[in-house]
Image (spheres, rainbow, N blue to C red):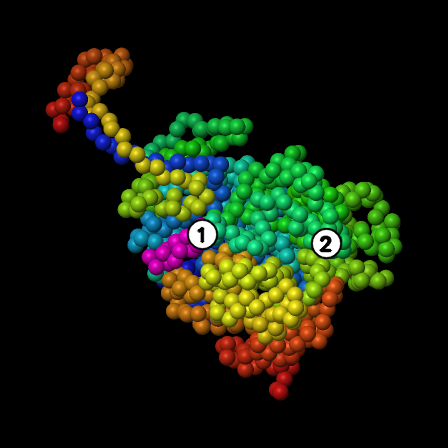
Amino acid sequence: MSKIKKKIKTIKVDLDKCNGCRACEVICSAYHANPKYSSNNPARSRIRMIRDPMRDVYVPVYAGEYTAAECMGRDKYIIDGKEYDECGFCRAACPSRDAFKEPDSGLPLKCDMCEDEETPLCVKWCLNEALIYEEREEEVDEEVKHEDVEIGLKAMVNKYGLQNVIDTVTRMSQKS
Amino acid sequence: MRYSETGFNLEIDLTRGNIERVETDPKLTELHLGGLGTNSKILWDAVSPDTDPFAPEVPLIFSTGLLCGTPAPGANRTIITAYSPQTLLMGYSMMGGFFAPELKYAGYDKVILRGKSPNLVYIWIHNDKVEIRDASHLSGKGAVETQELIKKELNEPNAHVAAIGLAGENRVGMASIEQGRSSASRLGLGAVMGDKKVKAIAVRGTKDINLARPAEFVELCNEVLEYIKYRNANPVPNVMTILQGLGSPQEMLHVDEKWHTENFVWGNARVRRKDFWNKEIEERWKNVQLNVRKRLISCYNCPMKCGAIITVPGLSTYMMKCFSKLTYSMAAFVDDLDFGFRIAQLATEYGVDGFSTPQTMAFAVELREAGILTDADFEGCPSDNQGMFYWLLDRIVRREGIGDILADGTYWAAKRIGKGAEQFAHNNIKKHEQLPLKLGMLNPVYFLMYATGEKINITQIEGQFPQSPFMTMEEREEFVRDWIQVPDEKFKQYLMDWEIRGERSNPYYPTVDMSVDIVDWQEMIHYFDDALGICAGLSSFPLKPPYHIHNYPKIISAATGIDIDEEGLKKVYRRNRNLLRAVNVRRGLRRADEVPPEDHWKKRFPELEKQLLDAYYKFKGWNMDGIPTKETLQELDLGYVAEDLEQRGILKDE
């Protein structure tokens, strides 16, 4: 069985250390300006502070995938008696909030971990170490696990019937 | 394109309800930078000098600094300017927080409020959309509560709101303007805002601020951050704890208050309690602070954590910084920090200054003890100290009974009360209450700063140079070794030669000329900060800060594209310093007003003090009455100021 190496990039977010200064937003928006650093505007940042000082809520969140539709319900977490609502931990650029959208065009933004830099700049500018960059390599199996495919297909068969699934797979294979 | 600034002010006429976005002259940026510098210019141009601070035509200016909204660390200050109802001079008070950058992102360098609204309103600025909105439902609401209510009704959790409480609405002379963890609290500008019937300004901005030479600028910012890291890891040795690091004094972090409680004076700035601090108090106070403190927090784009979220059981949450945790307890002679945190919660909601207010209440208590105020004045007042202070605070912000007189501050209250009450308003400079500090030997540098500072608040004038000499030569050598911030090498020698005792000690050393040099350096950095919107905590206030005369010109040039070097920047400082002085001279400020409290030092030296003031005026290019001469003004492109002062007969041909 062959193995491949995969680089895993992580930004560890320590909410307890966050001082709420938004330096992460500042340098992110400056870095992604065109030309680089030519302007500054936290509304364009790919990291955003969900911030409510009166409730001691400080959550830096990174822009993840764009989603066209909002969820049917809103997240609400309670951790150590403190309430985090309005999707405080969600990374999606979605219609339910204005985070992670270009203010002019409304186009979605996504964190790219500052690919040209050694470490993401939000981490570099976070002197309080609420944001910590970690990189590790993992070896993963290259093979496809047939059991997993079968579990997925069984669910489709239950829902649509075997013939529908066969037809769809046939059509897909002809297209590709 | 304009760099580092938006190039637009928002001018609002509250009487007519007119709102205009007005382009500014880029030449003014070159001459004055921005912030305090351009505020002074606006105030000079705006109104005739004898105008009442509450006259509708006096502009109340909320200004960003030139670097606010750029990535420069700590560039977040709002500089608020009007005439102070207390001092009657130009009042400028500043706050950190998040307001100034947000205003820049909305597309404005300043908000200039003129006129008076017929009803209580708040202003909502959302990029190009600006509204004057009814605030009648917010009347009487707390300053912190108001910020939350406005964000909620606008459904804008990311808006930043500067608001007044009941004190501002009632034109209390020590009313503050509160915003998040910050407040512009000195000199009563909250009363001016209340007089204009503006409860709050809310702002949300999502536009860009541009930089002239981006890569160079960000590299300079990286250097600043690196130096902050270095300083955080290397506290200055051989000075007391609160002077070792950067930021404003780390009062929310530290729990050891031996120094403040034993060196600052209690009551109406009277009693030094040299044996106050003990193990039991230390333990109790520490518990109180750690229990109410939820998190140490920062202003916009700054790694220092000078503020804290405070939640006292049973009271709504508020934010605090610096020394106000102690001012109420010490003024009231209450040996309990819990009282300090509790009454500060109410005082923050009411929106009052944490120095002038407790001092004024302690002044009232003394007047009662002296029989100048009577039991009739205190009818209904509880007899215990805590109760008395809560009662007085309520009377003051509501302007009820004796509170109506006290609400104007100790100077004006004493005048109205008479019967010798003036003797009890003993801790003022230019009619404004000062830190409760009483010392032994005159310090010539501090004498000059207290006497001549236009901010009338020592913490906004001091900095850079150690407050007292180092004990040994080794300590001095260690200090000067990496002292890169000095504008000139001579300052190192001043410090090396400064002794605790003997010929080269206070009050005759630093010598008169050296003292003037040192004060000029300290003032200069504050004037830069107040024009640029950089927090004093990263620049003019602490020892060995990351911003200084040698990197500021590069930072300003890269941000704005304005070609400026150290000499050019020093000239801007002198221009702004002289323009501000001229605004106040036109309102009657003279040498006779430049007097520290008589009892500030036990040992005074009238002849030396005269020499110090003479030398300072001469160095500044002022006449012996503290008025800038025609030549000085002309050299600084302020010929129009000289002309005006001549026409008024303030400057005469000599």
User: Mark 2 or mark 1: which is in front?
Assistant: 1
Q: Nearer the viewer, residue B273 or B458?
A: B273
Quarter of the image for the C terminus of chain B: give it.
bottom right
**Position in image of residue A135 (x %, y %):** 32, 36
Residue topped by disc 1: B230
Crowding near pointer 2: few (<14 within 10 Å), some, many (20+)? many
| Start-end of magenta stretch | B215-230
Residue B523 vertical placement versus B351 (above, below)? below
Q: Residues within 10 Å of mark 1 (few under 14, many from 20)?
A: few
Front residue of this view, candidates B212 and B22: B212
Residue under label 2, please give it: B265
Please check whether the numbered discs 2 and 1 fall on a single chain: yes
> Could you tell me if residue B68 is visible in this image?
yes
Residue sitting at the far bottom: B654
Where residue B28 appears, x then y in whole percent? Answer: 47, 69
Q: Tags 2 and 1 in contact by the CB under 8 Å rule?
A: no
The part of the image, by quadrant, that contains residue B39 is bottom right
User: Could you say which quadrant of the image residue B650 lies in?
Assistant: bottom right
Q: Is residue B226 magenta?
A: yes
Q: Chain of mark 2?
A: B
The secondary element bearing badge 2 is classed as: loop
User: Which quarter of the figure has residue A165?
Assistant: top left
